[in-house]
Image: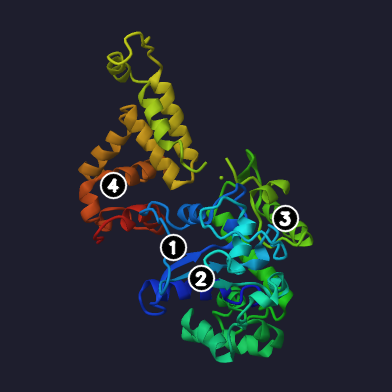
Amino acid sequence: MGIAGVGKTVSVNKFILDWAEGKENKEIVFIFPLPFRSLNLIKEEISLMELLHKYCFSGLKELTSLPEGDGKVMFIFDGLDECRFPLKFKESDGFKDVNDITSVSKIVTNLIKRHLVPSALIWITSRPAAASLIPRNYTDQVTEVRGFNDVQKERYFIKNSSPEVAENIIRHIRKSRSLYIMCHIPVFCWISLTVLQPLLAQESNNKTPTTLTGMYINFLLSQMQQMETKYNDLKLKGKAWSSDQIILMLGKLAFQQLEKGNLIFYKEDLEECGLDVGGGENGHLDLFLRFLLGLSLESNQSDLKELLPGLEVKTENIKDTTDYIKTKIEKENSVERTINLFHCLSELKDDFVEEIQRNLSSGNLSTQNLSSAQWSALVFVLQMSEETQEMFILQKYRRSDEALERLLPVIKNTRRAL
């Protein structure tokens, strides 16, 4: 157990990684990580084996049974304090069949009570206040995670910044005792580094926070700046919002949920505060859109008449469609969505992409100023090119921070860049 942000989940992940790489605990055959935040979402009744297939063995060969005898199995339940279903240990409903259908609550309690898979190792992480949800007679060992000691605090700043900045940060937090004590929490070290690194790049700065409140305010401001940089057009439920409005809604969400004792927020909690994460436009209709637009072409409709003789061929105004797509491209900030819109233009056999290809071949592209849509088209063409995937010569294009940023998707997907 340990307080929030002290490193419980990181410890779990490190344990699993060392086991997976064969460094530690080689006697364990299977480790099943089942965080409570995921278990909370399971509303239907299910068996233990179905649960493992659904959440731990997706796409792998079916697991018919759990090993017995010397083969050890481990279940890791991370975040007991996040549990939103009742854990009733006094009920005498102990079932022993891993294929029996029941609630997630009963699966968890019967694993802990050793009715299900008696030989299994069980590891549960929790904040101290929630640890009492597990009766003491079911607990064999308790370990308290206390975070960084003084040496580890300073090592963190040295490892994650330049020597000069790290020295300034360490000197500053040593002067502010409350900050120095808080830095035993790894996540607070990250917050401190985020806030102090730009402020202490120079040796003197009178705006450097010395209190916990000052640190959090500066952290909030830095997050708002990142939000505005990353999401120029913040929209929720079709309405544009400013970053400060989003922050106020998130504050409302946090306060109301903490009053209820909830530490993890789900979709319905966000929606209660006006934050819509659904719809959140995840690309699942991208291929369908390309296919649907392709059906606008008379040539494709004629081909379909072989399958559907009674199909009535209708010729739509393709130019209106392509012009509309181009206006969407000019306004779209997402590279992924822009790329899909260019795929749509290709399906409609538009010459916009061909124009970019001609300019690219002639060498004119390196000297002219490109519009946002032309840049997106260039990135699309380069990504589709087999030649680019082998080697990309950045020197051919306009050298600027803007150009580099726009061409990053191409650079990341090429085997060699010059």
- Most extreme residue toward the right is 259
Residue bearing the label numbered 3: 253
Q: CA distance from mark 1 to mark 4?
A: 50 Å
Residue 382's tag is 4
Badge nearest the viewer, 3 or 1: 1
The mark that comes first in sequence, 2 or 1, is 1
Say if 140 sits above or below 391 in the image: below
Identify the secondary structure beneath mark 1. loop
Q: Position of residue 127 (x, y in %)?
A: 67, 73
Image disc number at residue 66: 1
> For the residue marked with disc 2, what is the amino acid?
Ala
Quadrant in the rendering for residue 336 = top left
Residue in the image at 56% along x and 81% along y: 202
- Sequence order check, earlier mark of 4 and 3: 3
Q: Which mark is residue 100?
A: none
70 vs 259, nearest the viewer: 70
Left or right placement of residue 304 versus residue 7 in this view: left
Task: Please indicate whether residue 327 sits to the left or right of residue 356 in the image.
Answer: right
Asked whether residue 3 appears in the rendered view, the answer is no
Q: Which residue is mark 2?
A: 120
The amino acid marked with disc number 3 is Leu
Q: What is the x, y in percent for residue 90?
A: 72, 65
Of callouts 3 and 1, the N-terminal one: 1
